[in-house]
Image (cartoon, coloured by chain):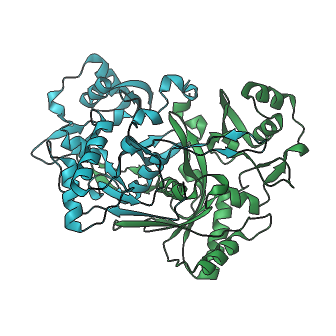
Chain colours: A green, B cyan
Amino acid sequence: MKKPKFLSLQVVENIPFVKAGDDLGAVIVDCIKRQNLSVLDGDVFVVAQKIVSRAENMIVPLNSITPTAEANELAEKTSRDPRLCQLILDHSKVLYCNGRAVITEDRLGIVSTSAGIDRSNSGSQEGETAILLPEDPNLSARRIRETVKKLLEVNIAVVISDSLGRPWRKGSVGMTIGLAGISALETGQKIDLSGRKINPEIALVDEIAAAASILMGQADEGYPVIVVRGVGFTPSEEVKIQDLLRPAAEDQVWE
Amino acid sequence: MKKPKFLSLQVVENIPFVKAGDDLGAVIVDCIKRQNLSVLDGDVFVVAQKIVSRAENMIVPLNSITPTAEANELAEKTSRDPRLCQLILDHSKVLYCNGRAVITEDRLGIVSTSAGIDRSNSGSQEGETAILLPEDPNLSARRIRETVKKLLEVNIAVVISDSLGRPWRKGSVGMTIGLAGISALETGQKIDLSGRKINPEIALVDEIAAAASILMGQADEGYPVIVVRGVGFTPSEEVKIQDLLRPAAEDQVWE
């Protein structure tokens, strides 16, 4: 594949407050049309997890939750809301508590903090809520991709991103939690000193999610949809986030 | 800070094969001038570790190394060249061996594999060599920044990047190993549901390094210098890579 020399990232402007049941692909296309934004084959749409979760109604009112003894214990240990701890326990396996942080492996296999569950200020009418990850972010990405393909007649890739923390490094970075149309890993054969063929693996989709995160910013101030142009990537119709993950049990770094 | 809506990344073309003693800032400026590339205040130059190390003569001929018993043991355990293992031991603390991978914390505090030491094919005349990280990548970044400032009269930031692996996720991504002129972390105060002020921390420089890595590609096929435009960042004159790192001993995730 010929290496590109220029990469651009463009905010999709005026994305409305996404609500449960909204067709997210159609909402994005509508904004793109109003903005008169060009979209080309090979562009990558990076979409923030939060609006995907909203569209898919992954919002839980905290006052609907009665924490178990286990959740109360986790809450005490981490100085957290017991109802939030109940959600974390319901949606992940807790691997470790590190002070206030709860390191989890969720049902998708993503190792992060708090199972990727955010509390967020969703407006005074709605009261205290938590936003869960989409049920199947790969499917969410495929749906957005299909809708954009149908409405704009372009063949794009979709990356659903979330801001995740990392061990050993401070601060969060944008990473991929679901994707469609683009390989999770790029491998490029080269020859090492001994003449052996080696295959470095690059987590290109995580680099794309990180790049888009520069424009997204955090939470409400940010822009939840970014169009990335100029990535040379390997297309894939069967890709899933699990292609990118090493389950905690298999990652001996963990032990 | 006003959020930008557009981000661009541009390859600096025709960077020559950098040799020990080259003034890297001057080499880059020379290419920028020949390319007629515009550079503006607030641009971020991402420079691949490898050319910084070359310019600073951090190249070690493997046949100059006599491995100790400890290095031989590590070599056996990880099926690696004992001379390379000696270099890893000389330049880092080995935290863990995971099959073939050697997880290390180097003297800068960076947790990575093999202390960031690459074997690389540097041409048949030179034989087998390994390339170490720059002695002080913060200083390397500051030098490049000063030279660019002097020769082009622009106030840029510099990020020195390397491709590093991560736990739980396959594939490498570009990350920062040294920097100048840009804060390591962006914090933006916001209000959570309970009305408390919280300060999310974003590792913006790692997101920039990851973004540039999309164009750099890997090793020789890639482009070692990328100009990133449109990042809204907090300037810093005192920044150092250590601002971004949690030492392994303090990161309980590790234990």
Q: Using residue B231 as the reference point, say whether residue A6 is left or right of it.
A: left
On screen, B41 above or below A66? below
On screen, B95 above or below B202? above
> Can you give x and y, in whole percent of width and height, for residue B125 in the image?
9, 45
Q: Residue furthest left?
A: B125
Q: Using residue B122 as the reference point, say whether residue A136 is left or right of it.
A: right
Quadrant of the image for the N terminus of chain B?
A: bottom right
> Can you give x and y, in whole percent of width and height, for residue B66 in the image?
19, 23
Q: Residue furthest top?
A: B69
Q: Nearer the viewer, residue B41 or B43?
A: B41
Q: Using residue A136 as the reference point, say whether residue B100 is left or right of it.
A: left
Q: Nearer the viewer, residue B186 or A152?
A: B186
Quadrant of the rendered image containing residue B39: bottom left
> Can you give x and y, in whole percent of width and height, for residue A179 in the image?
59, 60
Residue pictured at 69% horizontal, 40% vertical: B197
> Can you give x and y, in whole percent of width and height, for residue A222 in the image?
61, 58
Q: Nearer the viewer, residue B195 or B127?
A: B195
Quadrant of the image for the C terminus of chain B?
A: top right
On screen, B242 above or below B31? above
Residue pictured at 19% horizontal, 52% vertical: B26
